Amino acid sequence: MSVSSVEKGNQLEDAFHSFLCEQLDRGDLVYGVHAAQTCTIHKRKDYYCKVREADVNFDIVVEVTGKGREKPHSILVFECKNYKSAVPETAVTDFSHKLERIFGHSAKGVLVYSSRLKSGAEAVSRNTGIGLAKFDEHGLEIKADRRNTSFSESRFIERQFFENQEKAKSLKFSAYFEGKYLSSVSHLLQKIDPNSAGEDTSISAEESDRVPFLLDERLQDFAGKLLGEIGYEGGPVDLEKICSFLSLDLSHSDQTVFDSSGETILGSANFESRTVTINFHKNMQRARFTIGHEIGHFYLGHDKYLRSESVLERDLFDNDERGEAFNEVRIECQANRFASNLLLPQRHFAKTTYEFRNSLGLQDRGHGYIFVDDQPCNYGPFNQLLTLLSQHFDVSKRAIEIELVRKGWLTDQRRRHVRQ
């Protein structure tokens, strides 16, 4: 049964309302902005419209009532639009007109959506004073910071918004207001009500909390230490044993879950409850890598930056954190490289690769330790090597191949790369 547009809108509204209430319960709305006890969050609240001579309903309203006051002195209105395609600029214009008829200039409005914006919507937002917020309940949730900094760089947040922008890993919450890109409710509130915040909330890459770069050798040491702590001696790594050792609650879901752009979510982690959930999909070896990836987040201390995150298939192939990598990209790269070192323990992987390579008659004939091209005499033994290593360590052939490339052991001269 297909879901109607009204039902989809209600789903977004309900999910975003819950998100705001969780922020309030945690105190995230108070960071230099408003005391929690002064904030009231309403869902589907009516306000009288003189033009229509009737009540008009708004999806979600945050009212702030100062100490000793009877009426709210600040009103923030969220309108939720769950479009399947990009949000048109008319959605911003219509919301602006609706807001002005009821409140004049005494309230601020934010249009909340789950897809992307058409390019003209940004200009309309800027000229009408309407804020924009993208919400994906399965997205990566950043921890708000009390200081005037943000984990997410403006350039990364901008990639969340417009249909002509390159795809980026989805954030749970991202906002645009008066020319600034923001990654938390508290930063949005500070921007909307700067008198209460008392701070300039401009965000730049230089001001942000940078995730430190980690050399491969450091990640190998981390993974090796963890394997030593559980007494690993060879073969497929016991990931359930590692989760138990780290006090992580690992569970498997029979549901297929998708993010806001329709991509399959392989698994997710909640850093506050220390839970890892693996969603249903047919590739069990990929599920193992997903678990290793999530273990990496916990073991590397990424809970300093995140409350929760979800893993998409493409996240598992991010491995370059050099140069101008965004914090979000760097964190995924580190988790992937940790997972590789965890599932393919260095000493055991080198020894086993050497043994299988010799048993298959693969020799260095001046082309490298392991050589492959499109000739059957070279491709066949190489594929057998991938199969043997995959079965021995219970990881995918793709993960094996990535590790061989990363170590500089593979000379690949195939014209067409067939990914396993």
Image: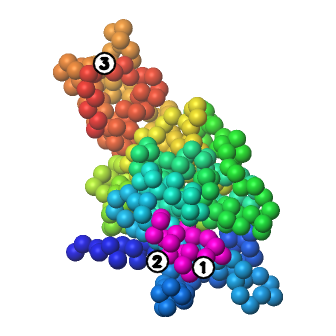
Q: Amino acid at mark 3?
A: Gln
Place of residue 372 in the rendered image (x, y in percent of width and height, measured from the top left): 29, 20
Question: Furthest residue to the top?
Answer: 366
To which residue does mark 3 refer?
413
Q: Which residue is mark 2?
A: 14
Above or below for 87 versus 224 = below
Question: Which residue shows up at 46% across the image and 29% down it?
Answer: 406
Residue 341 appears in the rendering = no
Q: Identify the residue shown where x is 41% and y is 77%.
A: 10
Quadrant where the image shows the N terminus: bottom left
**Mark whose residue sits in front, 2 or 3:** 2
State the mark number for residue 103: 1
Q: Mark 2 packing: few (<14 Cα in 10 Å), some, or many (20+)?
A: some
The first of marks 2 and 1 along the sequence is 2
Left or right of residue 34: residue 412: left
What residue sits 33% from the left and 9% below the top? 365
Front residue of this view, candidates 130 and 274: 130
Residue 233, percent from left and from top:
48, 43
Q: Residue at x 42, y 40 (%)?
A: 317
